[in-house]
């Protein structure tokens, strides 16, 4: 029996995933979390082989949770389950320590296959995403501006280009507006762009446009 944790801030998504796994054989959902801090606590305290984790949750984002669990040598293995199908998100997730990456449009069979493979010590990436990553690696060692951002800066960047205001970002991440403004300043500095319009144009140009306006 594979023990699974689910971390997603949407109750309907958690219910749907639990229903899918209950119908499949060999899986048991042993814990759920609706925000990043709860997900981290769950990964530390509840024995399980796999955690399904969303990228964007209140407080700590999914990447931060994955990175911290890896740093602490937690036994649970993370599979990122998100709306974002861009290779930039998958690459960053694996660098943080994720063992699998799926989009929320994936078929039930893909989800079952991914959990089974990761639970046994393997890594799962859909063929389509693997192809995107391979094409990306072909470009060589050139580092794009957004790849210089920290995980939290990247999260703020993603929210900025999707149209969220500073106060909305602050509420979503459970931090102060002043802190968001500081992250925003760092993003502009690191990416050498002096306006939010420039950031949006950059996101469109570099294949991040499908994330605009979507909730992860």
Image (cartoon, rainbow, N blue to C red):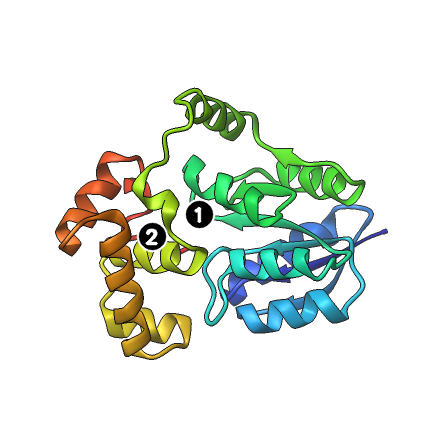
Q: Quadrant of residue 3?
A: bottom right
- First in residue order: circle 1 vs circle 2: 1
Res 64 label = none
Q: Residues within 10 Å of mark 2 (few under 14, many from 20)?
A: few
Expressed as whole percent of the image width and height from the top left, the position of residue 144 reads: 33, 37
Q: Quadrant of residue 141?
A: top left
Secondary structure state at the residue bearing disc 1 = loop
Q: Is residue 87 above or below residue 34?
A: above
Closest to the observer, 135 or 57: 135
Residue of label 1: 83
Q: Quadrant of residue 119?
A: top right
Image check: 198 left or right of 39? Answer: left
Closest to the observer, 113 or 20: 113
Residue of label 2: 214
Q: Quadrant of the C terminus?
A: bottom left
Q: Is residue 138 above or below residue 205?
A: above
Q: Residue at x 40, y 71 (%)?
A: 173
Q: Is residue 203 above or below residue 47?
A: above
Expressed as whole percent of the image width and height from the top left, the position of residue 162 reads: 26, 54
The CA span between labels 1 and 2 is 8 Å
Q: Say whether residue 195 is visible.
A: yes
Q: Say whether residue 162 is visible.
A: no
Secondary structure state at the residue bearing disc 2 = loop
Q: Residue at x 54, y 68 (%)?
A: 36
Q: Are marks 1 and 2 in contact (CB under 8 Å)?
A: yes
Q: Residue at x 28, y 69 (%)?
A: 182
């Amino acid at each position: 029996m594979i023990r699974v944790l689910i971390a997603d801030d949407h109750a309907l998504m958690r219910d749907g995933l639990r229903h899918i796994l209950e119908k499949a054989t060999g899986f048991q959902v042993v814990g759920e979390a609706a925000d990043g801090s709860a997900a981290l606590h769950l990964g530390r305290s509840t024995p399980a082989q796999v955690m399904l984790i969303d990228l964007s949750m209140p407080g700590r984002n999914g990447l931060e949770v994955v990175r911290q669990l890896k740093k602490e040598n937690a036994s649970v293995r993370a599979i990122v389950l998100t709306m974002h199908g861009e290779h930039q998100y998958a690459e960053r997730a694996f660098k943080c320590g994720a063992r699998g990456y799926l989009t929320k449009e994936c078929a039930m069979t893909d989800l079952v296959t991914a959990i089974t493979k990761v639970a046994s010590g393997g890594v799962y990436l859909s063929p389509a995403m693997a192809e995107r990553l391979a094409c990306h690696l072909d470009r060589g060692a050139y580092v794009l501006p957004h790849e210089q951002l920290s995980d939290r800066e990247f999260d703020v960047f993603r929210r900025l280009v999707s149209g969220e205001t500073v106060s909305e970002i602050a509420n979503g991440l459970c931090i102060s507006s002043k802190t968001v403004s500081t992250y925003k300043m760092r993003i502009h500095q690191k990416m050498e762009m002096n306006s939010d319009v420039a950031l949006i144009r950059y996101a469109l140009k570099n294949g991040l446009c499908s994330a605009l306006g979507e909730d992860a």
